[in-house]
Image (cartoon, rainbow, N blue to C red):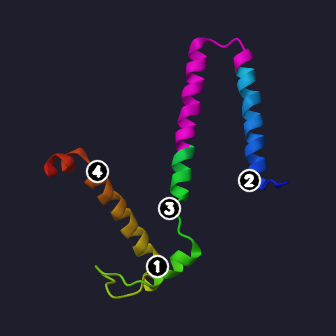
């Protein structure tokens, strides 16, 4: 017989709790507008949770991070240095620039220009 991990137990507890809350909501005599507001907030929070889960997937394992840290920076102020030897505040700044650049490349303006 397979034993459940703590994460599995927590998911089961969460599901049971959600079922109880939803049953209480369904049994209550709330107006239609209340129910609409309630479900909108649930959907909003689910989207936030999904984004958080997705961002957690982008975290490197320690092994990959160690390998990456040995790579050489190929551009800019610290070109030729290992990532491990570059100040973290600079790498954080660089990552923010990359996010902004990716957002720009996904913009309608750039898509239209490519066509």
Specify which label sits upstream in the sequence, 4 or 3. 3
In percent of the image, x 76 and y 35: which residue is there?
17
Q: Residues within 10 Å of mark 4 (few under 14, many from 20)?
A: few
Residue 49 locus on image (x, y percent): 57, 45
- Residue 7: which disc? 2
Earlier residue among tags 2 and 3: 2
- Report which residue position mark 1 lands on: 68
Q: Find the magenta span and give its range.
A: 26-48
Residue at image position (40%, 74%) is 90
Q: Residue furthest bottom?
A: 80
Label 1 crowd bin: few (<14), some (14–19), many (20+), radius 10 Å: some
* Residue that numbered label 4 is attached to: 106
Quarter where residue 89 is shown: bottom left
Going from N to C along the chain, the mark reached first, 4 or 1, is 1
Q: Which residue is mark 3?
A: 58
Q: CA distance from mark 4 to mark 3?
A: 19 Å
Label 3, secondary structure: give it. Answer: loop
Residue 75 within the segment the image draws in magenta: no
Provide the secondary structure element on which disc 2 rests. helix
């Amino acid at each position: 017989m397979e034993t459940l991990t703590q994460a599995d137990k927590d998911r089961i507890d969460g599901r049971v709790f959600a079922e109880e809350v939803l049953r209480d909501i369904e049994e209550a005599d709330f107006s239609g507008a209340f129910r609409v507001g309630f479900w909108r907030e649930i959907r909003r929070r689910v989207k936030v949770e999904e984004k958080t889960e997705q961002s957690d997937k982008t975290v490197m394992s320690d092994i990959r991070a160690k390998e990456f840290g040995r790579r050489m920076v190929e551009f800019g102020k610290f070109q030729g240095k290992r990532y491990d030897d570059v100040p973290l505040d600079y790498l954080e700044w660089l990552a923010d620039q990359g996010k902004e650049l990716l957002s720009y490349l996904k913009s309608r303006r750039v898509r239209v220009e490519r066509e």
